Image (cartoon, helix red, strand yellow):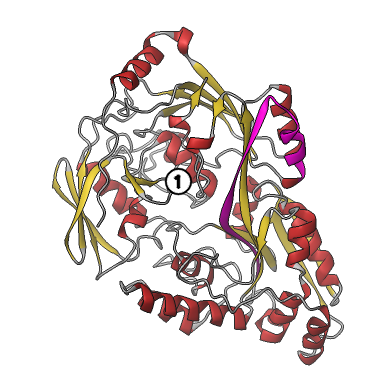
Amino acid sequence: MKKQLGFIGKVSGLLLTSLLVLNPATAKTLKLAYDADPVSLDIHEQLSGGMLQLSHMTHDPLVRWAQDLSFEPRLATSWERTDENTVRFKLREGVKFHSGNTLTAADFKWTFDRLKTSKDFKGIFSNFKALNVIDDNTIDLVTDGPYPLVMHTATYIFPMDSKFYAGKDANGKDKAEIVKDGASFASSNTSGTGPFKVTSREQGVKVVFDRFADYWDKDSKGNVSQVILTPIKDNQTRVAALLSGDVDFIAPVAPNEFGQIEANDKVQLVTMAGTRVITFQLNQERRKEFKDQKVRQAMTYAVNNEGIVQKIMKGFATTAGQMSPKGYLGYNESLKPRFNLEKAKQLMSESGYPDGFSVTMMAPNNRYVNDEKIAQAVAAMLSKINIKVDLKTMPKAQYWPEFDKRAADMMMIGWHSDTEDSANFYEFLAMTPNKETGMGAYNSGNYSSKMVDETTMKANKETDDTKRAAMLKSIEKQIYDDAAFIPLHWQNLAWASRKGVNIKPIVNAMNFPYIGDLAID
């Protein structure tokens, strides 16, 4: 396994951080505008891009992704494989939590055990048997048999402050309790090891983060002492705030707004190819029509996803016919997007529904780029095969509880692989929902295939890339033939900032900007 032991200390970095703490005149405030703010402060409550963005601000992972998709040491300084099922990590010493408590291996153990109980995260860690404490600064990650994605998964271990979450809150509730879409101690209180502490939070209005004076990474070039995060749902309003100087850094940037930014010499646009697939899932438990493979196929043929990419996304996306993007092991080049309206009408007739039927659809209006417009377009396209859609859109803070309840016949879901690997798509979006294992946690269509379930689990034990790729490609073919969902596109990424806010080195394909390392001129 490749070892990376970067981050050799630099006197300049130490001096810079000291100045930030001691001299307010050098402090840099970042006014940040995302399309939404985090739904909770409990980083294990929801597996989503917004929550992972928060995790990298308030916590630190064991290791993290670099822009070239290698692994950078963070709270682990080195690692080595000791046997086919075990990777040993040496931990960084002297790291402090925001509470003042010292990080030890026991906090990693406590965090790992909590992750294994999280409805959203347990699926990621299903192949892990244990996290064993060797001493205060050494841990072993142990898998249940050979597993090719140990390091990928280690990027999701952000140690929490076990002492901070010990005991009961004022209401007699366990402070460590994970409450999905509800109130808990952990959802409104946090103590991490990350570069920023949450100092004030008004849901949907503003979150203020202050630099943690005892942050361990003295080599970071980051000089932001405070972050003021303001959620601005509307794309145009967000860009207008940047152009007027009201904010310094915005994300995402819709393709329609690129021209304004590129024409202004005071701001800059940074773009990157993305791997988040945008889809609609078809709930087979709510609608008997969706149990018919021909109906699902007809709906897939009826949706002109290339048209959506060209007209709504302005070409700033890649039309999808499957889950795995090009470059992933599971990408199956034989599976093409399949818009064909006449074929769709033929399949509706063959299925016995030439006159169609009515369905409900839900989508967020501030989670994915142009999500509301995309949902409106899909609804219009389905009307051409006599499927009448009752569409409801809402902010993501309201959408995710509805998604968890499977509250509509069709629901939008975008997914970026948590491990930069194809299997993660299947584990969360295509495997049969299983509350015990966490598999299928975001499969709101209740699609179920014995082949997909069994082959995914076999692929997770296969360390030969050639054999594993064949398995993953066969899963994509099965899902494609079953028309398990409606694929739309892989969403590209775009950020913008005023010049002097150097965002290019801190953004990445995972869309977790490393704000702690942001340098402002």
Residue at horizontal 31%, vertical 30%?
97
Quadrant position of residue 189? top left
In this orientation, which residue lies closer to the viewer: 450 or 165?
450
- Quadrant where the N terminus sits is bottom left
- Residue 307 colored in magenta in the image: no
Q: Is residue 143 above or below residue 48?
A: below
Residue 150: give x, y in percent of width and height. 31, 59
Q: Are there few (<14), some (14-19), or many (20+) residues within 10 Å of tag 1?
A: some
x and y, in percent, of residue 319 in the image: 67, 64
Q: Is residue 164 rendered to the left or right of residue 276?
A: left
Find the magenta span and give its range.
256-281
Q: Is residue 226 found left or right of 83 in the rendered image?
A: right
Residue 315 in view, yes or no: yes
* Residue at far left of view: 135
Residue wearing tag 1: 67
Query: Closer to the camera, 283 or 56?
Result: 56
Observer-nearest of 114 and 495 = 495
Estimate the x, y position of residue 163 in percent, counting from the top left.
Answer: 27, 35
- Mark yes or no: residue 292 visible: no
Is 261 magenta? The answer is: yes
Q: In what element is the residue under mark 1?
A: loop
500, above or below 49, in the image: above
Horizontal side of 21 relative to 52 (left or right) equals left
Q: Measuring 38% from the left and 33% from the top, which residue is drawn there?
A: 194
Residue 177 x/y as whole percent: 39, 46
Q: What residue is shown at x 65% (from left), y 83% (from top)? A: 291
Residue type, numbered disc 1: Gln
Q: Is residue 322 left or right of residue 316?
A: left
